């Protein structure tokens, strides 16, 4: 399939999730300086201290607005973004202490880091309104042998239900849909995701969701098997789209059905995202608009 461009009625603008620049002062790393140019779209974070014979990651979980520590939080460490940083992680910390401090000894390597606190006190499971979480940032760090990399994680309160929870294939498959997210000016939209639906309505939880789009706007929806899907894209993973949030559907007001054969990818699908102009109704996670 050739690259196809579909126009919508939103104005160009928001092209990244809130919070992508939040930890810029922490970086001191980059894909170029650390030899990880193959990991696009990520924000490198962390500073190093002598591990005194140990290797791992440590830091504090704090409230984004107040900057105050958040005890009882958990830090999840992911090796990739296949699960959209929402599924089970490779490593998870013990609860942070009263100062928000966490520390994990993990092997040297490159990881994505996410902080969360569930009001239920559980370390895993879907997030609910009132829980705390790192916004959908792609914070990535390198753990080096014999050192601790220090990464602080600001979190915010989730105010609406997750739009999807477990509808992500958590391993690469040989079947799926790939393409790019762009704004009306044709610029890539980073930090968004595409959603696959088996019906044309697309006003419910999606059947599957993609990896987070990278700095080139590229996304991949891994599917367990072939079928027919309509595809949409947005930025946030909770509630219905809010006015101004980038949103788009492949095919516009008349969505195009994509036929996906088992063992194959439908490639070069381009979705143009424009500011959502509908009426926001809080809490409509099942039928968002």
Image (cartoon, rainbow, N blue to C red):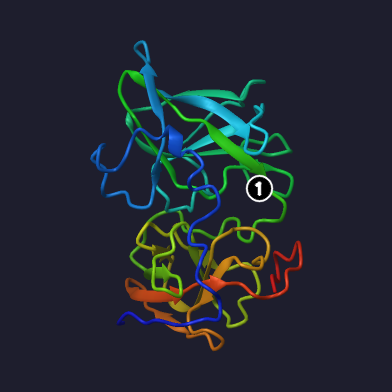
Q: Image point 49% across, 48% down: which residue?
A: 20
Q: Image point 32% across, 29% down: which residue?
A: 108
Decide if residue 88 is in sight here.
Answer: yes
Q: Residues within 10 Å of mark 1 (few under 14, many from 20)?
A: many
Question: Quick check: 35 above or below 194?
Answer: above
Q: Which quarter shows the N terminus? A: bottom left
Q: What element carries label 1?
A: loop
Residue 5 point in image, percent of width and height: 39, 81
Q: Name the residue under label 1.
A: 127
Q: In which quarter of the image is residue 167?
A: bottom right
Q: Which quarter shows the C terminus? A: bottom right
Residue furthest bottom in the image: 254
Residue furthest right in the image: 282
Residue 165 point in image, percent of width and height: 60, 56
Residue 140 point in image, percent of width and height: 40, 40
Q: How many callouts does the rendering have?
A: 1
Lateral position of residue 216 relative to residue 16, left or right? left
Lateral position of residue 38 relative to residue 125, left or right? left
Foreground residue, 221 or 270?
Answer: 270
């Amino acid at each position: 399939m050739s690259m196809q461009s579909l126009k919508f009625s939103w104005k160009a603008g928001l092209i990244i999730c809130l919070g992508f620049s939040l930890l810029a002062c922490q970086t001191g790393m980059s894909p170029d300086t650390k030899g990880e140019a193959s990991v696009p779209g990520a924000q490198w974070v962390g500073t190093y201290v002598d591990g005194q014979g140990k290797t791992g990651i440590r830091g504090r979980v704090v409230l984004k607005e107040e900057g105050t520590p958040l005890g009882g939080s958990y830090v999840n460490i992911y090796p990739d973004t296949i699960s959209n940083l929402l599924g089970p992680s490779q490593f998870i910390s013990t609860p942070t202490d009263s100062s928000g401090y966490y520390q994990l000894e993990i092997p040297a390597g490159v990881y994505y880091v996410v902080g969360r606190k569930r009001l239920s006190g559980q370390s895993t499971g879907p997030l609910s309104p009132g829980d705390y979480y790192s916004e959908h940032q792609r914070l990535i760090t390198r753990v080096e042998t014999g050192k601790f990399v220090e990464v602080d994680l600001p979190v915010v309160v989730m105010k609406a239900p997750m739009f999807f929870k477990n509808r992500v294939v958590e391993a690469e498959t040989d079947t799926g849909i790939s393409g790019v997210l762009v704004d009306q000016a044709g610029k890539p939209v980073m930090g968004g995701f595409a959603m696959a639906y088996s019906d044309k309505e697309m006003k419910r939880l999606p059947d599957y969701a993609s990896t987070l789009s990278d700095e080139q706007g590229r996304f991949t929806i891994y599917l367990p098997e072939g079928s027919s899907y309509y595809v949409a894209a947005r930025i946030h993973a909770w509630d219905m789209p809010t006015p101004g949030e980038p949103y788009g559907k492949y095919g516009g007001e008349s969505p195009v059905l994509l036929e996906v054969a088992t063992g194959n990818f439908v490639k070069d699908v381009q979705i143009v995202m424009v500011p959502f102009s509908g009426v926001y109704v809080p809490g409509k996670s099942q039928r968002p608009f």
